[in-house]
Image (spheres, helix red, strand yellow):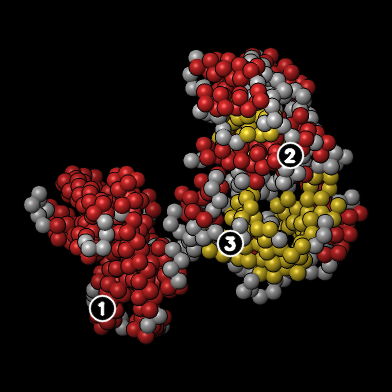
Amino acid sequence: MDATTFTSNDLAAAAAIGALGAAGFEVGPAKAVVRTLLDTFDGRLHAAGLRLEMHQAGASELVLRGAGVADAHVASEGAQPRLAADLPPGPLRARLTPLLDVRALVPVLTVRARARTAVRRDHAGKGRVSVVVSERLSVDGASAPAFDWAAEVEALPGYPKDTTRARELLSSIGLARTDGDVVDALAYALDIDLAGFKGSPTVPLDPYGDALDAFRKVLANLAAAIDANRPGTIDDVDPEFLHDLRVAVRRTRSVLTEGKGVLPADVRKEFRAGFGWLGRTTGPARDLDVYVIEWADYVAPLGPEGASALGPVLDDIVARRAAEHTALAKVLESAQYRRLLTGWHRWLSRESVDRSAKDASRDIATVATARIGRAQAQVLDRGRSIGPDTPAEVLHELRKDAKTLRYLLECLGGLYAPGPRKTFVQRLKALQDNLGEHQDTEVHVAQLRDMSRKLHASVSADALVAMGRLTEHLEGRRRAARAEFAERFAAYDTGKTELALHALLRSAGGRQR
Amino acid sequence: MKVLATYSIKGGVGKTTSAVNLAYEASRAGARVLLWDLDPQGAASFYFRIRPKVKGGTSRLVGARGALEAHIRATDLRSLHVVPADFSLRHLDLHLDATKRPTERLAALLAPLHDSYDVAILDCPPGISLASESVFGATGALLVPVIPTTLSARTLTQLAGFLEGLSGAPALFPHFTMVDRRRKLHREQLASLAAAWPAFLPSVVPNASAVERMGVERAPVAVFAPSSAAAHAFRDLWADVAARLWP
């Protein structure tokens, strides 16, 4: 959509309406209009160059703009869509589903106005250009914008001269012109970021700066991610809030662990314990989230009858998931949580902290190189010790080692050039995917067996048979992942990985090390 | 972008009526729609009050340096655009023949717009010609209006026979139009054709005065007679099409 917005602090909307009327525009009646911009918390639609709005002017309508000259419009039943499945079936849903995945749409900005549409038509009655004049503009939850009315000219394909004339007309009466629509203009005026929360663990770091300062900067960024994802987790908006909160907690704990010799020992001890508690507490709800998300894929091999027979099992999982989320919400609102995060923020924001740890004042690039090298050595040592008969627990330990390495690469990634970092992370990720599949299926097989025992008396024989088949299927996937491990690890434990790591470490701050 | 064409060898079966109303219903259902009027009569352009004019003529439209985007006109619906027709399209075959790969030309013209629209509907003139083959090369499915009469059914058989020998031929989405259930012949043909052709879309467009009024109102039926049987029929018909396109 190609729109231009005109505003004025001096002139009233009547000036624009009068000018448009005099120029032959038909000016329609004023209507109360509410425009709600919807996006995921992390701004997936914005990142894809799309804008989804719910328009309410009597009837409700969803409007999807961007990527091409035509907007998509579809009537909505009134309720604001939350998940992709709530969108009306058809191309709009087909476009948005892969982008949204499991994320929910949340209101980013709600604009209220009294709007009139002025249209200039040709002799056949065809509209060639339209101007929407919005008065009494306000944004929910925001201070009053610098302008309280605006005129928005939308370019229509095939009628460029009419669009140009309308813009010239509004400029000629002294209105200020900005590119974009009225939502853009209001967001800019009110300093509202439409891009969503970016929870990247990577922050810019000075390779010559003190390691302690770099670690604190990384940890403060992770604390912001925990804070940002807490309300959505409590309200159970979508499973990504809890996922992202947990990832931020795990990264925090990992950075605290790797901060030995950099961070004050007492701080490490206190907060490793605190974030360890938070990580453990948030685990059961996440496990059940994954179960629900993966359910359709899990039961697909059983066919529709098998999936249907497992209905009571899914009901049980959904009920337990809801209970775990209720318990989790209480944890995140508890005094223990508040004490942990308040204390943590207090330490992170202190101007002066204990710098007596032996590596605290060494440059971060040197410290990071040592920590990443050590983490890589740990992955290789443990991976090489694994044979066909090695117990599963050792693979789980290797998974943790690989995560530690990954977190270091992500959290201290600001030191390194993106290209070499990406190359190395891709190699590590291939190994992690295999370890993740092995562990997830093992956990879910154990949960299924546990459920079979619990539900034995209350579900049908068909359901028990289907659970048996599902367990068998997941066990097959686990065995396949275990069998594939040797090949995946061999592909990781190569000279290419070593070269990729060296290239990464050499890229720190653009200097050769 | 899903590319469809309202197509029939036979004239007067309701191709333009289907194209205009299905384009409208598709746009109301959330699709970004491009309606390409390929009929020199320009009726689809007329229904949307768009001047029937191909800028530079058909030679420029389909020629080697042609770009469809330059011919697109907005309608009064934000999600529905039209490439208008004019009388120069009567020479479409000749102009296509002058291009290097005439049967691929329409597909090549549509290709740059694939991310801009969800649906393109090509409203075709009757007959079977080089232009038709270019339409078959560009489309995923042909929306074939069929009046429940012997002659109309016969042309459907002819079309299916022709497409059989064509590699990468579009699917056939036949649908009944101008149906008058008071007539015994229509009722019989509806039953026998639907049984013989499972591809028939389930919804049936009635013979209705509201459809005839489109020429006076210069708008799709649902704009001026939203509660009419014809408006409901086109809405249902689009739902049938959409269910096949986005199962």
**Mark pair 2, 3: CA separation:** 28 Å
Measured as percent of width and height from the top left, residue A438 is found at 22, 53
Q: Pointer 1: what residue?
A: A273
Whether labels 2 and 3 belong to a single chain: the reply is: no
Q: Residue at x 34, y 84 (%)?
A: A336
Secondary structure category for the residue under label 2: loop
Whether labels 1 and 3 belong to a single chain: the reply is: yes
Position of B125 with respect to A457 (left or right) is right
Q: Pointer 3: what residue?
A: A79
Q: Pointer 2: what residue?
A: B220
Measured as percent of width and height from the top left, residue B2 is found at 56, 35
The label nearer to you, 1 versus 3, is 3
Residue A355 seen from this side: yes
Residue A412 seen from this side: no
Q: Nearer the viewer, residue A187 or B242?
A: B242
Q: Residue at x 43, y 68 (%)?
A: A236
**For residue A409, above or below residue A497:** below
Badge 3: how crowded within 10 Å, few (<14), some, or many (20+)?
Answer: few
Q: Nearer the viewer, residue B146 or A489?
A: B146
**Mark pair 1, 3: CA separation:** 44 Å
Amino acid at dot 1: Ala
Task: Return the residue found at the far left.
Answer: A389
